[in-house]
Amino acid sequence: MEKTLDLKFNYTEKKDTRSGFGDGFLEAGRRNPNVVGLCADLIGSLKMGAFQKEFPERFFQTGIAEANMMGIAAGMTINGKIPYTGTFANFSTGRVYDQIRQSIAYSGKNVKICASHAGLTLGEDGATHQILEDLGMMKMLPHMTVINPCDYNQTKAATIAIAEYEGPVYLRFGRPSWPIFTDPAQKFEIGKAWKMIEGTDVTIFATGHLVWEAVVAEAILRSEGISAEVINIHTIKPLDEEAILDSVAKTGCAVSAEEHQYNGGLGDSVAQTLARNNPAPMEYVGVDDSFGESGTPTQLLEKYGLNAANIVAAAKKVLARK
């Protein structure tokens, strides 16, 4: 279907966002000698091997001891190091929440928590590994910045950018091959939403893998005479409230789209912003209070209602409420 649509963005290649992290991590290390890496026995999965090979003295294999890894990372910041920790999103948050809260967030340590294999698109590993609560857990922590980029290029740019940012960061990315549709030379601005497509009837706020689905949804809606504005919210916290309010003031309604639970994710943040400033009809595209299951990424996104067709349906539903 994508090939027959008049898409505002196109792609010629697909690549996993975790590879964007790996390439960005290597570049960050080349630019700043204080960047160091720690990994909990998942070097290949996190694409940290190139950094380890080039900077072996700046890389630390902690083994399957994620809580200890967070403590080590926090300690390293005291001497000016910029540690990037690497493991699956489930283990980067749920398993070590206490250590992140007490040792990193509370004192604002300059640790970059880099989390792969997030969301349903982890696929066949199933519900125990498909964390869908991590954005909410991390955004609730004071001092924590939360970033969820959309493709290989944006993930690479974000990984480089966070080395220059002072303070704890949660960087979320994924496993599946995904369309590369953003500029390889982009400048990543933490906390600055990106209006990708102008529209007048409805605003679609999307993050992570669902940004591409929003691009496809916009083309479907446009073919039916509906003008959708698509905004890429790559930084969940700090949230670009001005961009949200300006867009909804124009369109009068909104849809949020994310690979995360309704509770605690991007949709919650957008809804709170609107409720405090300019209440407007809103619909959510996300996981509705459920765990995942084993399956291919495409199968799971379809079953749990996280694809372009669901964004289109949500847009039509919210338009009827204006």
Image: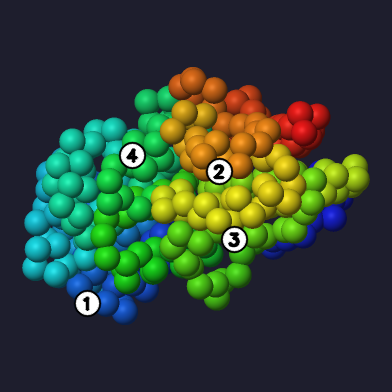
Secondary element type, mark 4: loop
Which dot marks residue 194?
A: 3
Q: Quadrant of residue 100?
A: top left
Q: Are marks 3 and 4 in contact (CB under 8 Å)?
A: no
Secondary element type, mark 3: strand
**Residue at image mark 4:** 140
| Amino acid found under the numbered disc labelled 4 | Met
Which dot marks residue 277?
A: 2
Q: Quadrant of residue 284?
A: top right
The mark closer to the camera, 2 or 3, is 2
For label 4, the crowd category at 10 Å Cα-Cα, with few meaning under 14, some 14 to 19 and many 20 or more, is: few
**Residue at image mark 1:** 33
Which residue sits at x=67%, y=40%?
A: 254
For label 3, the crowd category at 10 Å Cα-Cα, with few meaning under 14, some 14 to 19 and many 20 or more, is: some
| C-alpha distance separating marks 1 and 2 | 44 Å
Secondary element type, mark 1: loop
Q: Percent from the top left, x then y, of residue 263?
A: 47, 28
Q: Percent from the top left, x then y, of residue 314?
A: 72, 32
